[in-house]
Image: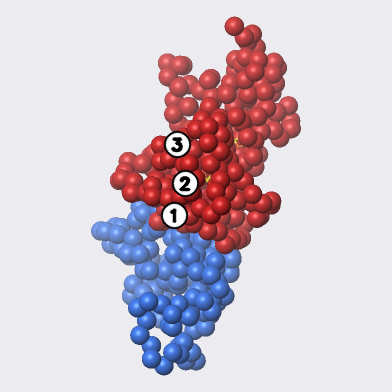
Chain colours: A red, B blue
Amino acid sequence: MSETFTFVIDDKEIEGCFGQTILEAAEEAGVYIPRLCHLKGLTPFGSCRVCTCMVNGRAMAACTQPAAPGMIVENASERVTEIRKSLVEMLFVEGNHFCMFCERSGDCELQGLAYRFGIAAPRYPYLFPERDLDASHDDIFIDRNRCVLCGRCVRASREKDGKHVFGFVGRGPAKRVQVNAEAALAETKVAVTDEAVAACPVGAILKKRTAYRVPVGERRYDHEPIGSDIEKRRTAAAE
Amino acid sequence: MGKAKIATTSLAGCFGCHMSLLDIDERILELIELVDFDKSPIDDIKTFSGRCLVGLVEGGCCNEENVEVLKSFREHCEILISFGDCAIMGGIPAMRNTIPLQECLDEAYINGPTVYNPSGEVPNDPEIPLLLNRVYPAHEVVRIDYHLPGCPPPADTIWEALVALLSNKPLDLPYELIKYD
Ligand code: SF4
Ligand code: FES
């Protein structure tokens, strides 16, 4: 059994064990740390920085930073939320996120974060980049307009499906998710049941013929903010 | 003291946000107790009669006329509100933003599969407002005080916002009233 220790998140004492990240220990204790590129079961990636916390006064990614005895973590403070908010706003302006017709709307983690933070409009100018769409596959399509480069598909395909269907090419603003084929998705080994397909937090990788099945008002984030499931564990435990 | 005045306009939008405003149903009777509508498609008043307390802007700017109208709203309104995703991020009209303008015009008037245009000309009458190179969110053209997202924003969102602003209270929308679809 691994040894346990305590550390502090927003004045609350949290139990952690060696080998756990701050985000994992927090989640176990019912404290939600917002995240986007992190997905349980995949190797932490640390790319989106939405999980940024002040750890002993310094900004760190909670999904990659190991928890340690005596750490002082600031999670829900105004200045930390402000950092996360601006990161989410940047993600909105640097892609083409047309929520009004996106099949993923209401169930999208990026949108869910924006709702949770109460973002009415981003404060940065929209870039409207030119991105492409690959609908070559019979059951799946990739709309790169909506991709947030979280790498969840890349990791899930490699670690869960054992296929290496997705990877990144390019750098900076030109970085994009690419498929392991000369031309298009149809020529890869991807299957509609792959974990990589389910791993996408936004509407960038979607299954065809499944859209708009859940009515407005019954979707994941229609009534409760993203992270509520984790926070409920805390209230349930306290009762 | 007279009633506060409110102005509304639809720029590069579909009038859906205005429909949502009408969707406040019988509360519209309460609203006209609180305000007089000035320049607005609701009463078809075409020019400002004076300063307004609140201006509601639907749609972003896709042509020079939109810019002119938006600027006059900024000049005449104490509080200017972007309502709806088109005003906030360009919306459906902004889907053309990743395509060069000439290509858009050629597709619409010359190459499109359903186009019938024997003259092969793209309309260019001086009466027609010139298109901008791309569609701009309202807050990228003038200062905007509040944003009410949604496509369209729910009637309750518009109602809550107007009531708060007209009664001088801070605008603090509950979780369920901020939606992007
Ligand atoms: S396609 Fe989806 S899962 Fe893959 S990097 Fe983009 S947003 Fe992430
Ligand atoms: S969730 Fe930690 S960096 Fe993305």
Say which quarter of the image contains residue A198.
top left
State whether label 2 is within 8 Å of ligand 1.
yes
Residue under the image location 33 percent in, 75 percent down: B43
Q: Position of residue B35 (x, y in %)?
A: 38, 65
Circle 2 sits on which residue?
Answer: A205
Per the rendering, the mark at residue A135 is: 1
Going by the image, does A7 lie left or right of B47?
right
Indicate the amino acid at tag 2.
Ile
Could you classify mark 2 by the number of other residues whose Cα lies within 10 Å: few (under 14), some (14-19), or many (20 or more)? Answer: many
Secondary structure of residue under mark 2: strand
Q: Which chain carries label 2?
A: A
Mark-to-mark CA distance, 2 and 1: 10 Å
Mark sitting earlier along the chain (3/2): 3
Q: Position of residue A192 (x, y in %)?
A: 41, 41
Q: Where is residue B164 in the image (x, y as percent from the top left)?
A: 44, 53
Indicate the amino acid at tag 3.
Asp
Same subunit, tags 2 and 1:
yes
Q: Is residue B92 above or below residue A140?
A: below
Circle 3 sits on which residue?
Answer: A194
Which circle, 3 or 2, is nearer the viewer?
A: 3
Mark-to-mark CA distance, 3 and 2: 11 Å
**Which quadrant would the N terminus of chain B be assigned to in this image?**
bottom left
Going by the image, does B30 lie left or right of A140?
left
